[in-house]
Image (tube, rainbow, N blue to C red):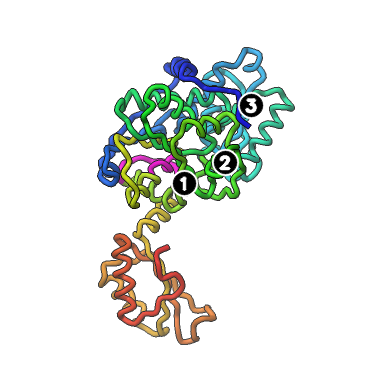
Amino acid sequence: MDSDVTVTIADIRAAREVLSKVIRPTPLKFNRALSERVGADVFLKCENLQRAGSFKIRGAYTRMSRLSPQERAAGVVAASAGNHAQGVALAAQMLGIASKVYMPVRAPMPKLAATRAYGAEVEQVGETLDESLVAARAWADETGAILIHPFDHADIVAGQGTCGWEILDQCPDVRTVLVGLGGGGLLAGIATVMRALKPDVHVIGVQAEQAAAYPDSLAAGHPVQAARMATMADGIAVGLPGDVTFPIVRDLVDEVVTVSEASLSRAALFLLERAKLVVEPAGAAATAYLLDRAAGDGPPLEGPVVTVLSGGNIDPLLMLRIIRHGMTAAGRYLQFSVVVPDSPGNLAQLLTDCASVDANVLDVEHLRTSAEIRVDQVEIGLVLETRGPEHQSRVLEALRAKGYVLLGTDQPL
């Protein structure tokens, strides 16, 4: 069912005035490497450099600044996987409002620590944002605290829309804007600005395919619960579009697309290496689509293109895994096993053969207990550093030519 709540350009203009003394416009950085791949000028809107590490402070502060004195006295409650939590906690601290935030039990430790550091009381409930949101609603009903929804409120959408206005200030001739999509607050706000001030801009929302509620919802004409929620992009892992955001996305956004987990990790690694920017998987979703599009056969995007890096709050341990995953997806790690006679010199010969094709050995594991090998054999597992898919193919072909039988997954991870 469509909401009767609307968000106008006047609402976003008012939010901009409210936020002018609270946040700073984030940089819009030209990226040559992406531009060369895409065939058009590409700019990165660096919301990962915003206060509290994401765009979320825009909506949270706008919403909370409009509370009455009585509502402020009652305190606020929120549910979040991390970025909205920090935005709410920081906004509450600045406005002198008590805050409580429910976060999933597997929320990243740095996001938990940062939320508490801003003064919020944190309670971990449920495996997903949707489960945490149920607990937050119950607390609001029980105590009278004001629920600060992560995306489904007109003030939240208006606040997030200020990011779109900044894009037009910084790149007036923009032709395509790509935005990561979870619940839809940021995308709805940016699309509202574009349609009002520059209606010919092509607006694309990008979801993680393992947590994509919008494609089925748009096809059905109403919000539909996502069938699965299994993505590293916790910041956009939202199972059900909102009543406020859904009709805006449906009516104002040109396309909603999805990207794989491999694409997300490749994009985060690309931004780290080629843009020198730390971006969490959710924040890299729009860039992931750009890289996929550049590698595919579809028509080029019309430039200038702006891709929004929505957040940079990432657990260092997750960053390590993403770097490994991204390098694997990019063809720079190769894992396989071979069986050789269990006698002196065979391991050394295998390593020499790998070196002869310029493959750097990162890890070696001996397996002597497998039922698939004889007692006089040993299975050797290798992880190699390679220079891309073509180099991986040459390595595998060279080893097979020398008589090695590759076991298990003899293709890239």
Query: In whole angstroms, how far apart are the C-alphas of marks 3 and 1?
Result: 30 Å
Secondary structure, mark 1, is: strand
Q: Which amino acid type is shown beneath numbered disc 3?
A: Leu
Does any portion of residue 186 appear in the rendered image?
A: no
Does any portion of residue 315 appear in the rendered image?
A: yes
Q: Which residue is mark 2?
A: 217
Q: Which residue is mark 3?
A: 147
Q: Residue 18 versus residue 200: which sits nearer the camera?
A: 200
Disc ID at residue 258 = 1
Can you say whether 334 is above or below 57 in the image?
Answer: below
Q: Residue 116 versus residue 151: which sits nearer the camera?
A: 151
Which residue is located at x 62 percent, y 17 percent? 72
Give the residues drawn in magenta, as a range. 274-287
Give the percent coordinates (x, y) of residue 247: 55, 31
Q: Which amino acid type is shown beneath numbered disc 1?
A: Thr
Q: Which amino acid type is shown beneath numbered disc 2?
A: Ser
Disc ID at residue 57 = none
Query: In whole angstroms, how far apart are the C-alphas of marks 1 and 2?
Result: 14 Å
Left or right of 401? Residue 229 is right
Give the percent coordinates (x, y) of residue 228: 59, 50
Q: Residues within 10 Å of mark 2 (few under 14, many from 20)?
A: some
Asked if disc 1 and disc 2 are in contact, CB closer than 8 Å, the reply is no
Which residue is located at x 49 percent, y 23 percent? 159
Q: Earlier in the sequence, mark 1 or mark 2?
A: 2
Comparing marks 3 and 1, which lies closer to the viewer? 1
Secondary structure, mark 3, is: strand
Can you say whether 361 is above or below 375 in the image?
Answer: above
